[in-house]
Amino acid sequence: MAITIQEINELRKKTQAGLMDCKKALTEANGDMEAAMEILRKKGQLVAAKRSDRDAAEGCVLAKVDGNYGAMIALKCETDFVAKNADFVALATKIIDAVVANKCKSMDEVNNLTIDGENIKDAITNRSGVTGEKMELDGFNYVEGEDIVAYNHMNQNFLCALVVLNKKGFEEAGKGVAMQVAAMSPIALDADSVPQDVKDTETRNAVEKAKQNQIGKAVENALKKAGINPAHVDSEDHIESNTAKGWITPEEAAKAREIKATVAKEAEANLKEQMIENIAKGMVAKFYKENCLLEQAYIDDNKVSVAQYLKSIDKDLTVTDFKRFTLRAE
């Protein structure tokens, strides 16, 4: 039977599928609108299955706040072209609106939501059929608190942050801290909030680095005392290549190897445990300062920490929680 342009446009309006896809679906369904919609839905599932192993690295990240609740989601796709498509962004917007309206607290709750009478998973699958790209919902986060500020970096929908303040009426300060979160990617609120396994790992690494630094200094001083440039013998490859170039003699190469072996062993045996612990503590403290939000140098005034900046506005003002999500590799 002949398919009219009115029928094609009606199906396109309902599904957002391409004109040719709508025409083919209506033709296959002999003009039955419901059957044509089902054909397009199945096509979306087929596309999603075929592209399940593809990397969805682009997409749309959105954050929204409603009273004492804030959330962010990332609807991912394969290409920047689709990510900037108005219909794709509209779908992501409907999802974040539904998430906030229902104050979801888990991805399961999000996936069970409906938008326009359709389950979110089905809506994403159907959109995948329209674009021909893999799509997936990822990066759900939420916060609750006294006052919440959402930040969408450059309004480009690829990096969002949520910041919770303990007091209302400080939106400008909250925005500044949200920009801090976006720019500096802290891993925790403060040192006490750093997961114990991260603390243990950083401490072990700091102790080992402190030991190697002290051993390295001892070896370097011994090499200099012997008249050998440490940079010429810092690895076996350099020793061989610099000997071949004539920058060091075979005798100097042999001497360097002997010094590196004997001095390193002697220095390791005589390391002062308390000194190593103190150096390691300093390294860990630096790690906290660089990676904990309240201890980071504030981006608009690096002479003060974020905590100090907030207290300069109000002595009791602080951040109680934050979340961040980005599509970009860091």
Image (spheres, helix red, strand yellow):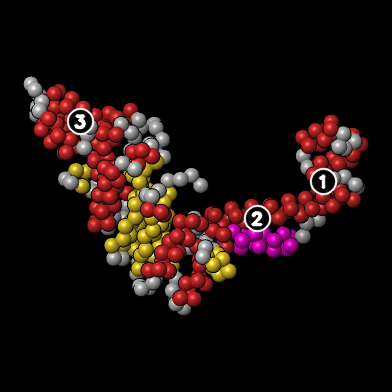
Q: Which residue is the site of mark 1?
A: 230
Would residue 266 be visible to someone looking at this image? no
Point out the frontmost of discs 2 and 3: 3
Q: Amino acid at mark 3?
A: Leu
Residue displayed at 26% across by 42% down: 87
| Sequence-first disc among 2 and 3 | 3
Q: Residues within 10 Å of mark 3 (few under 14, many from 20)?
A: some
- What is the distance, in whole Å, between disc 2 and disc 3 at their CAs? 61 Å
Asked if residue 90 is positioned above or below residue 169 in the image, the reply reads above
136 relative position to 159: left or right: left
Q: Which residue is the site of mark 3?
A: 19
Question: Contact (CB < 8 A) between labels 2 and 3?
Answer: no
What quarter of the picture does the N terminus occupy? top left
Residue extending farthest top: 1
Image position, residue 38 (x, y; %): 16, 31
Residue displayed at 47% across by 72% down: 310
Magenta-colored span: 273-288
Secondary structure of the residue carrying tag 3 is helix
Q: Amino acid at mark 1?
A: Pro
Image position, residue 262 (x, y; %): 85, 45
| Label annotation for residue 155 | none
Q: Nearer the viewer, residue 292 or 171?
A: 171
